[in-house]
Each structure stands twice: as C-alpha cells, then as structure tokens.
Amino acid sequence: MKTYKEINDKIKAGEAVVVTAEEMIKIVEESGPKVAAKDIDVVTTGTFGPMCSSGAFLNFGHSDPPIKFEHLWLNEVHAYHGNAAVDCYIGVTRMADKRPFEYGGGNVIEELVAGKQIRLRGISNTTDCYPLGEIDTYFTINDLNQAILCNPRNAYQRYSCAVNSTDRTLYTYMGKLLPNLGNAHYSGAGCLNPLSNDPDYETIGIGTRIFLGGGKGYVVGHGTQHNPKKRFGTLFVMGDLKEMNEIYLRGVNYEKYGTSMFCGVGVPIPILNEGLAKKTAIKDEEILTEIVDYGVPRRNRPTLGLTNYKELKSGKIKVKGKTIKCSPMSSLYHARKIAIELKEWIEDGDFFLNPPAETLPTNIDFQPMRQTDKIKFVKDLKKKAVICYNDCDIKIVAEKIITQNINHVIITNRNNKLEGIVTSFDITKAVAKNKNTLQDIITKKVITTMDNEPVDVAARKMKKFQISALPVVDDKNNVVGIISSEELLGG
C-alpha cells in the first residue's frame, strides 16, 4: 500500500517511477502485479479525439460605455449569453452562421489558444446602466480577464464501432460511413484511455489534477451521460485556457454533419495497491466494444457483433463474415504523446497528484429522454406496395397505375429484392419518347426507408431528393411496403 503523500514526496525528490499505460502492460506481464505495485508509483494515460460536449467561458471586461450582451458572435459563431453582462460560453459544436459545416466553436477555441485575433460582434437591449446597443471589435486571449475551458463530457471510457448497412452514404459524428458495410469507424485510445485504467474510480474524482489541452486541469465531477454500468464512463473537466496549447485543442469539421473539437486529456493513476497495478495493465484485446449499425436512426441501434481495441487498431474488423476496413476518428499518436508528456511533467517535479475530494459514482442508472409526444415511425404509416417484376411488360406497369389509382410501382426481382421504381410520370415520358421496355424508364438508384425510421426522417429524405415516395425495405433489401407524401400529409 502507498499513499498520495508518499508518492508526492518521491516526485518532489525526483525519485518517482513513472510509466505510461502501454509500458505498464509489459512490466506486469514480466514481474506480476505485486512487484509492479511496489516498483511503479504512477501510470500516465492519454486520449485525443473529438469531444463534442466541450466549450469555454470567456469574460471580456466592460466596454465604455458598458454593454450587456443579448446576442454575441465570435468569428460569426453564435455564443451563448445567459450570464452576467460580458460573460459568454462558446460551445464547440456551434456552427458559424455564414459558414455552416466549415467553421464552428471548436475552430474559434483553437485560434484563440493559438493567439490569433477573434472578432467579437454583439448587440444589446439597452438599459440605464448598460446603454451601449452594439459593439464590433477584435481581441486575443491575452485581452480576456478569464478564459476557462469547461467541458461537461470528455474522455469516454470507450466508443462503439460505427458501420452502415444501408445502401446510401451516411454523414455522422462518427464520420462518413459508406453504404453496405463499406467501412467502419471507431474512437478512443484503448489501453491508454484514462477511464479504462481506473474503471472503478479508485483514484479519479472531484478535484483530480489532470493533463487538459496541453495545460493543467481538473476533474469537476462525472460527465454528462456518465454510464459506468455499461462501461461508458465520462468526465466533467475544466482548466485555464490561457495555459493550454493549440496542439491539443483542434477544431474539426465533419462533412455534412457539423463541427467539434479534438481535445487532449491525460489522467495520472497513482499505484496505491496491487489491484491498481493490475488494472493499469489492461490490454487492447481486453477492452470490448459493440459494432453498431448507424443505418438505423434509433436510440437502440442494432448491434452486429463485438470487437476489441486490438482488432480495431489493426485496421480491419469482421462483420457478418465480411472483412471491413476500420479507421480511427481519434489520434493514437497524440494520445501517446499526452501520456509521455504527462510522465515527463511528473518526473521533472512539475506535476503533483492529489486525492479526489470525492470519487465518481459507479451506480448511476442512465436514463433516455422522457418523451411526452408519441413519435410516429414509417411502420405506422406505410401501405402495401404495388409490385412488378423486373422482366414485366411496360404495359402491365401502366395498367396497374391506372386501375389502382397510384403514382408509384416498385420493381423487384422474383425474390422480392428491390430493383427500382417507376412513377406515373415515367410512364408519361415513355409514351412521349416512344420507349417500349421497362428497363428504359426504371429508376434503379432508389432512396429507401425502413420500418423503424422516424417519419420526419423519411420526410426529410423526400424533400432532400425531391421525390414523393420511398420504398420500405428490410435489412436484406426485401420490399415490405411503401410510404409516400400522401401518407405523410395524412398522418
């Protein structure tokens, strides 16, 4: 058994033995956890990836005459004002009004830390004590009284591996997911991840000093959506932005999704006992995670299998017997760099450990959103599809449109697999242009939906692609119905 005081005394004397989480694996393998607990004082961890629940509180000081912001923008990114007169909070996922998807709050914070000038534009509902109605100025981080990085949810214990089983490309916070299980994305540093090395929160809690964004920070408490029972623990962290480095705070922009920020977090784990020595030697292959189908837009997306971080880091995983290329959304290079830099701080006597005032909870029940309005799904509004086979005569298709008073006929093969769609307008064009076969008019690239897709998502697809109906298919591309704009209007 060791104490924090004993370890800090060794740090002060330059005698502490500090290793990274990756180095600890080999030490425990060769010597065992009992010897490792005696020999090793601190294990350092690190993770560097997109952490969407992040942002910064800024204080600008008072103008002359004073202003009380009602709305303000930093480089045209709308910041939140609901605090005192000249305080604001800028979140990393807020996109610029004039450059959505290209620039956002994460980019502002990166540029601020890098010392660049930031444009501040604000308006006010004037009062007697705050008579200024508008301001347009520029500032740097050194002009601010306070700049506090305050991140409600960082350093997820692990992430699910994202894939896409649908026939269209998806643009998500897990990046661009190609159709038909064309690729897989994951995030997290595996065996280097802070919460994987202390999953029972023996040493991590309120007041724990950490590496944050290239400077020193603190754990404020458990993060939002903290779900330790499912191994999805999170941290609420904060620190002085003026002491941080843009290397470890990087704005990122995802195609057709939005903006975020890569944030570097490293937590030192004091080896107080043999149990912690064993836990900090966790291997990538021991950290399991689910392969989740993001093609199903539901809270409880289908799980297609299990994988582990060793397999993920190899660059390939297997799903349904298919080998898929797998890419990280985070940086293992920077995670290692964080763990090494934190190790050097401790060895140089620049970073001391402190016991948490209170450890983080392990028994929280994670709750989904309470919804009082009933959400309608495609299965609630779909109707039976009128189907013709792909070798059908065009006249039969035309007859079905007339006799059944419909605008869409779904084309399948003899096994009910979707092949295309024909509309009444297609038939009209066929007559006008003297086209005589079904293959001349069929639309083969079809936008589809599924039973468990929310109706509003299906409606957005129709609007985006300027179509009036969607075939409803199952996960094997069998046609199970159709939903049109008529059902949406009626529903």
Image (tube, rainbow, N blue to C red):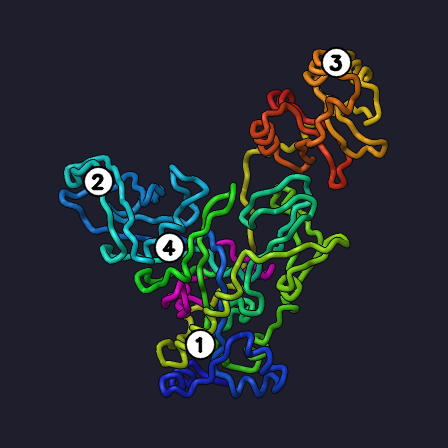
> Magenta stretch: residue 221 in it?
yes
**Amino acid type at mark 1:** Lys
User: Can the viewer see residue 220 in this picture?
Assistant: no
Span highlighted in magenta in the image: 205-233
* Distance between mark 4 and mark 3 Cα atoms: 61 Å
Q: Position of residue 450 (x, y in %)?
A: 69, 36
- Categorize mark 1 by other alpha carbons within 10 Å: few (<14), some (14-19), many (20+): many
Instruction: Tell which circle, 1 or 3, labels the residue nearer the N-terminal end.
Output: 1
Q: Where is residue 84 in the image (x, y as percent from the top left)?
A: 26, 47
> Magenta stretch: residue 255 in it?
no
| Tag of residue 279 | none
160 left or right of 481 in image: left
According to the picture, the residue beneath numbered tag 4 turns out to be: 110
**Amino acid type at mark 4:** Glu
Instruction: Tell which circle, 2 or 4, labels the residue nearer the N-terminal end.
Output: 4
The image quadrant that residue 486 belongs to is top right
- Categorize mark 2 by other alpha carbons within 10 Å: few (<14), some (14-19), many (20+): some
Instruction: Tell which circle, 4 or 3, labels the residue nearer the N-terminal end.
Output: 4
Q: Which residue is drawn at 75% across and 37% down?
A: 477
* Distance between mark 4 and mark 1 Cα atoms: 24 Å
* Distance between mark 1 and mark 2 Cα atoms: 45 Å
| Tag of residue 434 | 3
| Tag of residue 135 | 2
- Categorize mark 3 by other alpha carbons within 10 Å: few (<14), some (14-19), many (20+): few
Q: Which residue is drawn at 54% across and 56% down?
A: 329
**Amino acid type at mark 3:** Asn
- Categorize mark 4 by other alpha carbons within 10 Å: few (<14), some (14-19), many (20+): many
- Would you place residue 242 above or below residue 381 in this image? below
Instruction: Tell which circle, 4 or 1, labels the residue nearer the N-terminal end.
Output: 4
Instruction: Tell which circle, 1 or 2, labels the residue nearer the N-terminal end.
Output: 2
**Amino acid type at mark 2:** Ile
